[in-house]
Image: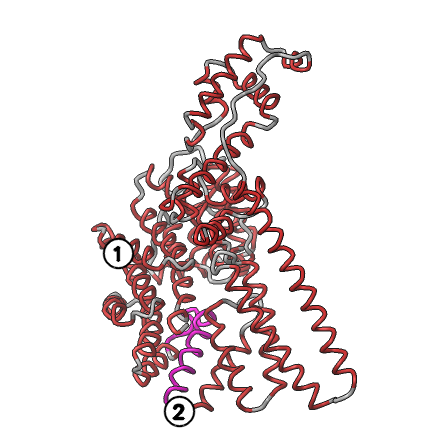
Amino acid sequence: MLSNDINKVIKMVVTLMIYTLSLINACLYSQQDQNDLVNKNNPINNGVDSLSQKTLKELESSYHSSNDFILSNLYAKKYLEKAKKEKDTIAMAKGYSFLGILQEKRMDVRYFDSAIYLTKNIKHKYYPISPYVRKGVVYYFHKEYSKALDNYLIALEYAQNNNNVRYQMAIKHNIALLKKELGNKMEAIVMFKENLKDTSINKFVDAKLLNLYGVADSFNKMKMPDSAKSYIKKGLDKSIHFENLPFYTNFLLLSGANNNLLGNYQQALDSLYKAMNQNTDLVYSDKNEPIIYLQLAKALLKTNRETKAIEYLKKVDSITNASNYDIEKKEAFDLLIRYYKESGDLENQLRITSKLIEMDTLFNKKNTDVKSDILKKYELSQLISSKENIITQIKRQKDQSTKNLYFVTSIAIILTMILFGYYRKQKKYKQRFEELYQKQITHKKNVDQSVSKEKIALNIPEESVKDILVKLEVFENEMGFLEADLSINSLAKRFGTNSKYLSKIINMYKKKSFNHYINGLRIDQSIIRLKTDSKFRNYTIKAIAREVGFNTTDTFSKAFKKQHGIHPSYFIKELEKQLNIS
């Protein structure tokens, strides 16, 4: 848990890097030039109508140099309006991107979609790469990891086709962050290190610092502080050398967490206090604040300064709600619950426990990939159990009347109903597994290939029907359905017919659509192999899906569940039990 507290910082730093990358085709100005532009271009000083006289380049410069949301929005809208008048496609895409950046906190990606629509068929160095990356970052910050990955992968393909090295590096870094977020920290470290080995990274200081941070933070989260330490030192040295205050502050935070892991609590406090005293405008204090407070509290508790530690934990509580809660902050609430419990403060213990249950429940609903369902249910049930125990204690202290008994009884009934529903569901799954386990799956031959009166409605020559049915039988026996990119058009071409004939015959004789027919064969083959191949059972669900022709794990799992009523992971687990018993 200690090593999880810095993850939020990486998210902040990624924003900085991606923001820079999305604007790398913008003109660069000195600080004095930017200040002059702000004063010169401020529509409040000169009148909104003055914006209509400005060129696209001037409006873009005003947008970048403005720190005011209202002004930035005005510049972006005027930029887009002028781009439309001039019918400049890239400028229009850039204008939509400017507006999208201003709406990122609201998880509004419509402007980025507009930019993508305009440029998806145009070969350009930055478009549609930039809006795809931006969409990915928005989804990442809002914990929509699957959508984030989809957009990163599309952007990476465009970046590779356009030979945009900087974007390739940034996108790979973001994908590594996703891996780290989903628990694949070693895989993330490999990707961060690959970026660091790329010689072109020397051109981009921010990219180098980000990947140093990614490696160090991953090692911290794996409880390997010794491995993280050298990367933290490199990050601190480079951020000082290049006078990059935001990165320097973030590496100070990471150093504080690292020293907490190593047991160097005074050194941890030194780094964290130093980070807290940096210029807050430059280090995104709203994002770093709870992380600093939690790490300070942990170091203070270890050095017997509980009163001060609790003050910082209370600050975390005061600035955390369901909208900004994440798993890194959970430890602060766990520590507060323990403190209130030991202090006998049942009211605050109940308040914090209830708040944590609410936030954790909402967080888990949104982040199904972070932990297994079993672990989530276990943790939540423990919290609920703790909450009910506290309620019971308070009730006994305040009112020993029969209302207390009624309340407890009601809770027991509800829990019993929940448990009953859970066990019924498990029993149904077990029954479906048994049926599937006993079922003998074979690829059946076509029994009746004659053309009945009913089948005359196909309006296909009888010889063509028989020919396609024979080819389908060969196709099944030779397991042609295992090909990953199989489509009805490609199969029809292989059979020497057209997709319309093939679709009608499959619908009539297989009683399924083409996709359901292919998916059914693939699912059946996966079950056969799982039953007979012990090595295959040890594959990941992703690997199993690919082996039988599915391009994604999600498509495989949904098809398996739809066909047999249980998930493949459940089937494999129960199959192992059954085979061990046998």
- Residue 101: x percent and y percent? 49, 53
Above or below residue 204? Residue 341 is below
Q: Which amino acid does label 2 sit on?
A: Asn
Q: Distance between the residues labelled 2 and 1?
A: 39 Å
Disc 2 residue crowd, few under 14, some 14–19, many 20+, Cα 10 Å:
few
Q: Residue furthest right?
A: 402
508 or 313: nearer the viewer: 508
Q: What element carries label 2?
A: loop
Disc 1 residue crowd, few under 14, some 14–19, many 20+, Cα 10 Å:
some
Q: Is 285 contained in the magenta span?
A: yes
Q: Mark 2 points at which residue?
A: 304
Q: Mark 1 points at which residue?
A: 193
210 or 387: nearer the viewer: 387
374 or 70: nearer the viewer: 374
Quadrant (top left, top right, bottom left, bottom right) of the N terminus:
bottom left
* Figure quadrant of residue 212: bottom left
Above or below residue 464? Residue 8 is below
471 or 122: nearer the viewer: 471
- Residue at coordinates 67% horizontally, 83% vertically from top-left? 392
* Figure quadrant of residue 459: top right
- Residue at coordinates 51% horizontally, 86% vertically from top-left? 339
**Residue 170 visible in image:** yes
Above or below residue 96? Residue 487 is above
| Stretch in magenta | 278-305
**Residue 81 visible in image:** no
- Residue 272: x percent and y percent? 36, 79
Q: Is 216 contained in the magenta span?
A: no
Q: What residue type is labelled 1?
A: Lys
- Residue 479: x percent and y percent? 42, 28
